[in-house]
Amino acid sequence: MPFRAVLVAVEEAADEALRTSDDLYARHDPQTGQAASLYLQLRSLRHRLRVMAPRPTAASIVTDLELARTECRGALQSVEPLVDRALRVVPQE
C-alpha cells in the first residue's frame, strides 16, 4: 500500500511534534501553542489517511504537509526533517 509509508512518516512527525510540545509546555515556552497546533495538524492528517474512504488525494496530502512544514520554526525545527520525509514518500497520482 503506497499510503502506508506516508502514514508511518506522518505518525513519526506527529510523535516528534508531541514530544516537543510537551517539553515546551513544561518550560512554559510561548511556542507551546504553535507546537500543539502542529501536532493536531499532523494527527488530523494521520486520521484522514487511516480512516477516510476514499483516501485523500496525493495533492491534498502534499498541501497539508507543506502547510505543516511552515510551522517548523524555532523549537519545532526537529519536526521539519520528518515532514520532509513524509513529503518525499507521497505517491504520485
Image: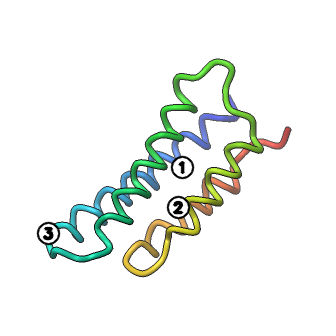
Q: Is the residue under label 3 in contact with that under label 1 (CB below 8 Å)? A: no
Which amino acid, mark 3?
A: Ala
Q: Residues within 10 Å of mark 1 (few under 14, many from 20)?
A: many
Q: How many marks?
A: 3
Q: Position of residue 23 (x, y in %)?
A: 21, 68
Residue lying furthest right in this view?
A: 93
Q: Position of residue 24 (x, y in %)?
A: 24, 71
User: In which quadrant will I find the C terminus?
Assistant: top right
Q: Position of residue 86 (x, y in %)?
A: 61, 53
Which amino acid, mark 1?
A: Ala
Compare residues 71 and 84 and report the one nearer the observer.
71
Q: Residue at x 58, y 22 (%)?
A: 52
Compare residues 72 and 6 and report the one nearer the observer.
72
Check disc 1 and report its element: helix, strand or loop.
helix
Residue that carries the numbered disc 3 in the rendered image: 26
Q: Quadrant of residue 2?
A: top right
Q: Residues within 10 Å of mark 3 (few under 14, many from 20)?
A: few
Q: Earlier in the sequence, mark 2 or mark 3?
A: 3
Residue lying furthest top in this view?
A: 53
Residue that carries the numbered disc 1 in the rendered image: 9
In the picture shown, does residue 69 fall above or below 93?
below
Residue that carries the numbered disc 2 in the rendered image: 82
Q: CA distance from mark 1 to mark 3?
A: 26 Å
Check disc 2 and report its element: helix, strand or loop.
helix
Q: Is the residue under label 1 in contact with that under label 2 (CB below 8 Å)? A: yes
Q: Position of residue 89 (x, y in %)?
A: 69, 49
Q: Residue at x 48, y 32 (%)?
A: 47
Nearer mark to the viewer, of 2 and 3: 3
Check disc 3 and report its element: helix, strand or loop.
helix
In the picture shown, does residue 56 fall above or below 59?
above
